[in-house]
Structures are given as C-alpha cells and as structure tokens.
Image: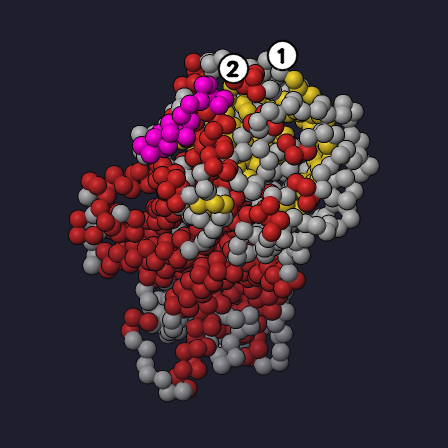
Amino acid sequence: MSGRGRLALCAYAATLMAACSMLPLVDPVSWMGQAAFLLAVQCGVGALGRQVPLPRLLTVAAQMLVTLMLLTVAFAREQAPAGFLPGPQAVRLLADLLSAGADDVGRYAIPAPATAGIRLMLVGGVLLVGLAVDVLAVTFRSAAPAGLPLLALYSVAAGLSDGGADWLWFLLAACGYLLLLLAEGRERLSQWGRVFAGATRSRSGPAGGDLSGGGALAPVRTGRRIGALALGVALVVPAALPALDSGLLAGSGAGHGRGGGGGTISAVNPLVSLQNNLNQPENRQVMSYRTNSNSPQDFYLRILALDQFNGNEWRASTRRLKDVPKRLPSPGGLSPEVAVTEISSNISASPSYRQTYLPLPYPATEVRVGGHWRYESEGRTLVGDDGETTKGAQYEVSSLLVQPTSNQLADARPAPAALQREYTKVPDSLPKVVKETADEVTRGARNAYEQAVKLQDYFASDGGFTYDTSVNSGTGSAAIGRFLKDKEGFCVHFSFTMAAMARTLGIPARVAIGFTPGTAQSDGAMSVGLRDAHAWPELYFEGIGWTRFEPTPTRGTAPSYTLPDAPSGDPADPARPETGASAAVPAAPSASDSCPPQLRKQGECGSTVASGAVGPTDSGTSTGTVLGVVLLALLVLLLPSLPMLWRIRARARRLSFSAGRTPGDAVSRTLAAWREITDTAWDHGIVPDESLTPRKAAARIVRLGQLGTDGAEAVHRVAGAVEQVLYAPEPRPGAGLSEDVQAVRAALRASAGRSDRLRAVVAPRSAVRVVWAASDRRAALASRRRMPRRPTWLRRPSHQEG
C-alpha cells in the first residue's frame, strides 16, 4: 500500500473513532454501521480520483457529488430518478428530514430515538466530517488541520450529552487524530534521506533497536498493519462501548435491551419511553412521596404539558426560562371564588430515575429543591439547568388542590382571545372524522363543560374503547383517525384524541405527561412505579384554569367535578407534613379500593406490599463490564504513550552500552552515542541527512539547533570519535561519550520552544524506527523461509535509512 493509501485509511479510521462520541446520543446505534459503509464508499471515490490522477478540486467535487447520491439512496430513494439521482423531489425530502431532525434534537433528551431526521443528521454529519478530513489530510497532505473537523464532531456530541463517559470518547477521538498524524509523519519520512550510521550494520547491531547501514529494505506491509489496527479499533471499540450511555450508568434507559430492569421517562418528550414503561414486567419504583392531602387519588405528578399539535405529533412549545421564584405566581385563570386548599408534600426521586423536568403536583405554588433549576411559567414546570436532573432528588412542594363545582365549570366565561387562538389550533391534516365524532358525541351539550364530560365518558365507558398498551403509539393525525376506528389504545391515544376533539369544539386543550398517584405503602408513603407513567388531557375554563380530565379506562381516577351530583371535596389537612419519615398520609386508600376492576382481575393491584418505601432494584453495572471498561481505558491511555516509552528505553540502552574489550565493541558504543545525538536532534525537528560526513553533520546540528559553546563542543567530540572508529587503522573508544550526549540533549532543549520540547518528549519523531525495525525483522524471517522476493513498490527507497 502506498503512503497516501495508508494516510487515506487512517483518515477513515480517525473519522469513525471521533464519530463514536455520538453513540450514546441515539438508541439504537445501528446508524453507525450505515455511516461506516457510506464513509468507506466516499473515501474510496477520493482514493480512485487521486490514483487516476484527477486535479485536486475535481477529486473533491466528485466526492461531494457521490456523498449527495449516497444520502439520496439511503434516505430518499423512492423520490430519486433512477433510485440514486438527487432530483428536486429527493432534495426537498432531504431538506424536510433535516428540518424534522432539528426539531427532534430540540425535543428529545439522551438517548433519543433514531428517527429518520436524526439518522440523516448523524450519517450526513459523519460523511461531511469524513470528507473534510480526507480532503485536508490526504488530498492536500495536511493532517494537522484535519483535527478541527474531528474536534467539531466530538464537540457536538459533548455539548448534547450529559457527561457520563465523555472522557472515554475524547480519548478515542484523540487516538484517531494521533494515528492520522503518525501516518502522515510516516508518509513524509519516506521522502527523507538515510540517517548517517557510518558503518555497515553488524549482525548484532547497536542497541536500542538501532538500524544502520545501506540497502535496508522498506517495511513489508507496514501501512497495511497500521491500517488494520486503526480500522479494528474504529469498528471494534464502538461495538464494545455502546453500553456506556446514560441509560446504563444512570438507569434511565428506555426499558429494553441494555441495562436491564426497565427504564424511566427520560426524554423531553416522555412519549419516547412511555409505552415501554407501561409494558415493563416489573413495576420498579422511581419516586415516593408523602402528602397531607385528603384526596390522594387526585395527586397526579405532572412533568410537562404538550401544547402544540402539527399533525405529525404533539410537542411542547419552546418558551423562555427564568430563575425559580421563591413563591410561584398564581395560576392563570383561577378565580378567588373557586375553593382551593394548599397542601404540602415531600417527594423523593430514586437514584435510578433521571429526568430533566421535575415532577410536581399541579398547580405548585412553592418548590424547595437543591441544585440548578429554571422555571417555565406557562406550563408551571421546573427544568434542570447545567445538566441537573431528578436523579436522587429530594424536595418539598406546596401546591393547590383546586376543587371547582360543576356549576362553576358550566358557567365559565370564554377564554381570552390569545389563549383561545393558541390552544384550539388543529392541523389541516386532521381527519374529518375527528370533528364529526366530536359533534356527534357532544350533541345536546349546553356548554363547554358538558361537552368535555361527554367526551370523557365516551372514551372511558360509553364508546366501547379497550385499553391496550401493545398498540403502536403513533400520535399524529393518522394515528388519531385509526384509534377512533379500531377503538384500541392506551393513555396516549385517549388523551391526544380527546384533546384534539376538544379543540375542534373550540375548547382550549393540551396534554399533560407524568405519573398517576401510585400505590399506598404500609408506612403511609406512596410509591410511584414505571407503570404509573401516564398521559391525560387538560382543558381550560376561565375562572378555574387548566383542568384535568381522565378519558383512559382503568387508569387513574375521574375527577370528582366530572361525576354526576359530585359534592365538593373535603379540604386537605392544613398541617404541613414532617420532612422526615414520620409524615403519613391521612386516610390513604388501600390498593384494592383504588384499583380498577380490570387490573384487579389481572392480579396487578398489589394486595401485598413490602414494609416501607421500596428503593430502586437496579443491580448496577456488572463486574465484568467494569473490568472491561477499565482495561480498555488503560489500553487507550497507553497507546499514545508508546513512542515516548520506547524512546526512553532506547536512550537508556544506548548510554549504558558497555565499552567492551574488542574493536567491534568500541565501534558499537561510539555509533550508539552518535545515533542518540542524531535522534535527539531529530526529535527537536532537525531531520537527519546521511549524505553528510560526521563533521558536517555535527556542524549542521550546531547551526540548526542554535547550540551554545558547550553543546557545540560535545557534538564535535562525538563526531570526531565516530570518524576515529570508522576510519582509523586501530579504532579506539572515545571517553565521556555519555556525558557529551547528555550535554547535547540539554543544549537542544534549552534552544527549543516549549511546544517543541513537549513534542520531543511525548511524540518523538525518531520513534518511527521501531516500525522500521519490526518490518526488517519480518523481512529477514521471510527471506529465511525462502519467501518470494518483495515487489519493487514495497521496497524502502535507497536513500531511506532503516
């Protein structure tokens, strides 16, 4: 393989190694295989263009065109002429996917689902970075600037992630960059002259892996070994490391595949994992709380509200955040005439539960929580700032128990015009059957309140709907139309469809995501598990504000103000609960009393509960995984330091070389000292030149290294010793060679800049000798086995020193 071919292969591997930093961001990670294949095709086109050879700019243009065609085949094949040509429709689809992917990135938290838009952004980003690296490092032969796109790729991943194993991904990306630099250095070294050695190499040769003499052959398959190692690291490491994402380390996976034990709602749009949580075999606890409310069945823990419906999905609006006030503002639209009671609650999140939004009873009036949190006033939610999550959080909340009467709801005035416009929007793609069904179901209703109750009863009991968590959780217009036809679904379908139907009737509506009240424990605490994840509609009534409804059968409880002849609820105990474990829930219902009949038949009502609040049941990361990660980390840390370690060992052996008693020993010792001087100068940027005599080579080192008097005299003394042992009739060993070598090394370090001194220690240029030595040993072994003669293109040039 040619030097440029090795460089191209290393550029490919470096891009993949940097792209590994994106693995924890998306689940599943199958996009990586697609990106690796398309990147290989892109790099192959560049290699072919350089082999022809094409002009540089034409080679880059060909790679760009092929990249666009590859993305067209992968993401817009059906809209492309001939299946691969990027026509107008295909380009328009790619643009739409990019726009949808940008929306998904802003909506989902780690790990986000691999939607088509996100996959296009990931694969396209890797291809663009790979193209930049290939152009800079291979086409224009400048590997150092190629680190900028690699750094940009890692920086994007680090900026979107929440910490975790960022250091490990950084080391992997850094190793890819170092590999690229070493490959470029090896390719450049193939142009340099042979390093002066003075005499033909003896069978034993100088110590420290030195190679001398002329006629040394080129490394056999050196580039192939480097490329295979790089490609192996780039492909094997990602397969071994995806489990390091936040889902495993924080227990916030989606509940399938990695981590075991299920997951929790971990996305800004929690619908990503809501269905998985509901289908978990084990209802693992994620939160526990104590409250002094006398209506625990109404204690829903609300995460956020989804208030925009674009036809494809419901999503939360992007709104401005501000500091959390000591006392939250009064809820919008709430009249003083409505009965409210302030209750107090102590809430604890399990260490395995990590969520950006803080679950709160609605509407909260005061929140006392540690950490960095921000307040979003429209949804009355608290959002984690600077990586803050609910993991292990303990906080105290004061909230209002709003208890309107049916008459107050029926007499509610129209909502403000701005609120009415924003929360009654429906997309044009919404099927007509939604509006028609809403009109039919609410026929005879005299006001918006009666319409809302009729909608709730239609879904919960009168319409023949069945609760089924195995149904596809689509939330767009088509999914709503399908749900009304099939009448099967779970809370997502019930809440979204009721909210959409309410909007068609002119009732402001949105959808809340959070948890139902959970299960009472024997010590008075309430335990909230994965299967308590829930979605419900909130409808706005002027004078009451946003009001909860419950259309999902067998889930939660219908609010008292929606039941016939419902009296107003009893006020809560005004006494605040204790912060410690002694606070209890007065008159908490038993599991059998609050359990719906359908779940009671399935044996899921929890008739027996363990004493005390149950902690998380995660077994943690396995010992094998920890040991594997530690060993891999040590390997990644060791690889960049190998040149430095080899250089230290070679210097020690050269300077400790025994003088011996024979002329051959004197020659070896003197040449080892001279080799150490030339290599030290090489490490500091002075390229060896074998064409010079020892005396002229010494003068060149003094001139380029800007050595002082002591260093110059030491170089010339060692050069004189070399001439003596090479050309004198009776070679005699020189005295004080080790001291002279140390004096030259100190003089070179004193005249070099800080960065040059650092590189001379951390990444010494002369360390390439170890690769040459290994190749020559392999060639010698092959010749002893009578292997065929190496072709000319694999030989080291005659002017190249081994």
Residue ID at (42%, 48%):
472
Q: Name the magenta segment's main secondary structure.
A: helix
Query: Tag 1: residue type?
Result: Pro
Residue 201 in picture, x, y percent from top left: 46, 76
Residue ID at (49%, 13%):
413
Distance Cα–Cα, label 2 vs label 1: 13 Å
Q: How many residues crowd mark 2 within 10 Å: few (<14), some (14–19), many (20+)?
A: some
Q: Which residues are magenta?
A: 432-450
Rendered image: mark on residue 336:
1
Residue 434 in picture, x, y percent from top left: 36, 33
Residue 587 vertical placement versus 639 (above, below)? above
Residue 287 visible in the displayed image:
no
Residue 167 in picture, x, y percent from top left: 57, 49
Of 526 and 386, which appears nearest the observer? Answer: 526
Rendered image: mark on residue 25:
none
Query: Tag 2: residue type?
Result: Ala
Please state, as top left, top right, bottom left or bottom right, where the C terminus lies in the image.
bottom left
Report whether 136 appears left or right of 362.
left
Residue ID at (38%, 73%):
220
The answer to which image quadrant residue 89 occupies is top left
The residue where tag 2 is placed is: 412
Residue 321 in picture, x, y percent from top left: 54, 24
